[in-house]
Image: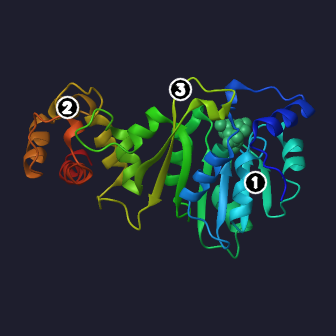
Amino acid sequence: MDKDIATPVRTRAILEKYGFSFKKSLGQNFLIDTNILKKIVSFAELSESSGAIEIGPGIGALTEQLARSSKKVVAFEIDQRLLPILQDTLSPYENVKVIHKDVLEADVQMVMEEEFQEINDIMVVANLPYYVTTPIIMKLLEDRLPIRGIVCMLQKEVADRISAKPGTKEYGSLSIAIQYYTEAETVMIVPKTVFVPQPNVDSAVIRLTKREKPAVVVKDEDFFFQVTKASFAQRRKTLLNNLTSQLPNGKEKKEEILTALSASGIEPVRRGETLSLEEFGRLADELYSYFH
Ligand code: SAM
């Protein structure tokens, strides 16, 4: 077996060979610790018949580990300069396909249909570019891709918000948006020292396991998310205050909002951060007819 890409010595040699300079604007912080990479892959629980989608392979550190643990890897990389490097570093692995594309603009569903024809168990595994973590995760979930879940490295602060429980200061509309589709857990805290260059923030790995059906059944998803966003607009305000100031014509509909709160058994003086997903679901459904 070839020497791992993700050692400090080999990584430095690859970067020097190609005269590669990091682009901060693309969130390029490469992993140089094989143990961390193996752990990330183990959280994805892949088998020989699994497929893996990677976002941002860099010079192939994680891609290599995924290629060894799955049937096929498809990796989206935005930076053209990395393509010849990846072709070189990943040449021992025939089960890897690198696609030169911004993942936010890619038709991931179509790529999956083309590339994973005989593969049913598919995970997204990535060390995400931190400048776009949330849009990438939201895109993957909102597109309702046929994946089992996502294991990814991201800023610890965002990981905390994603996996936060009601009643904590990290809990907000992002927690709800992601927990609506998945069960979210922070599985590892990662020190800065395992990256080159080292990022300015602390990092963590989260595992998102897709739910068979959303956490709550609601009349209208868009409206449910609109209500949750409105409820957190100003965290120190009460639910009633936020809903009247944020929902369309909310001020004129104060009585209706009060009626909906009462019908869903929620005190108007509570704050958004204390409501569970179920409570937000009930509230959105009670409010629905007044806003449609
Ligand atoms: N996987 C490598 C590793 O762990 O060492 C690199 C991870 S680095 C944090 C993020 C990677 O994502 C970089 O290679 C960067 O060029 C790439 N990237 C940034 N924005 C992207 C986008 N919108 N679509 C696809 N790749 C992107």
Q: Earlier in the sequence, mark 2 or mark 3?
A: 3
Residue that mark 1 sits on: 64
Mark in the foreground, 2 or 3: 3
Give the Cα separation between the discs numbered 2 and 3.
36 Å
Q: Position of residue 242 (x, y in %)?
A: 22, 30
Q: Which mark is residue 250?
A: none
* Depth order, front residue of 155/268: 155
Q: Position of residue 203 (x, y in %)?
A: 53, 35
Q: Position of residue 81 (x, y in %)?
A: 85, 35
Q: Name the residue located 85 percent from the left edge and 29 percent from the top edge.
A: 20
Of the four image quadrants, the one with ligand 1 is top right
Give the Cα separation between the discs numbered 3 and 1.
26 Å
Residue type beneath disc 2: Thr
Classify residue 93 as left or right of residue 24.
Answer: right
Q: Name the residue located 87 percent from the left edge and 58 percent from the top edge.
A: 92
Question: Does the residue tagged 3 have its C-beta within 8 Å of any atom of ligand 1?
Answer: no
Q: Earlier in the sequence, mark 2 or mark 1?
A: 1
Looking at the rendered structure, the secondary structure element under dot 3 is loop
Residue that mark 2 sits on: 244
Q: Which quarter of the picture shows residue 165?
A: top left
Q: Name the residue located 12 percent from the left edge and 42 percent from the top edge.
A: 256
Q: Earlier in the sequence, mark 3 or mark 1?
A: 1
* Depth order, front residue of 118/46: 46
Residue that mark 3 sits on: 201
Looking at the rendered structure, the secondary structure element under dot 2 is helix
Q: Is residue 253 visible?
A: yes
Looking at the rendered structure, the secondary structure element under dot 1 is helix
Residue type beneath disc 1: Glu
Question: In the image, is residue 121 above or below residue 233?
Answer: below
Question: Does the residue tagged 2 have its C-beta within 8 Å of any atom of ligand 1?
Answer: no
Q: Is residue 252 visible?
A: no
Q: Position of residue 2 (x, y in %)?
A: 85, 55
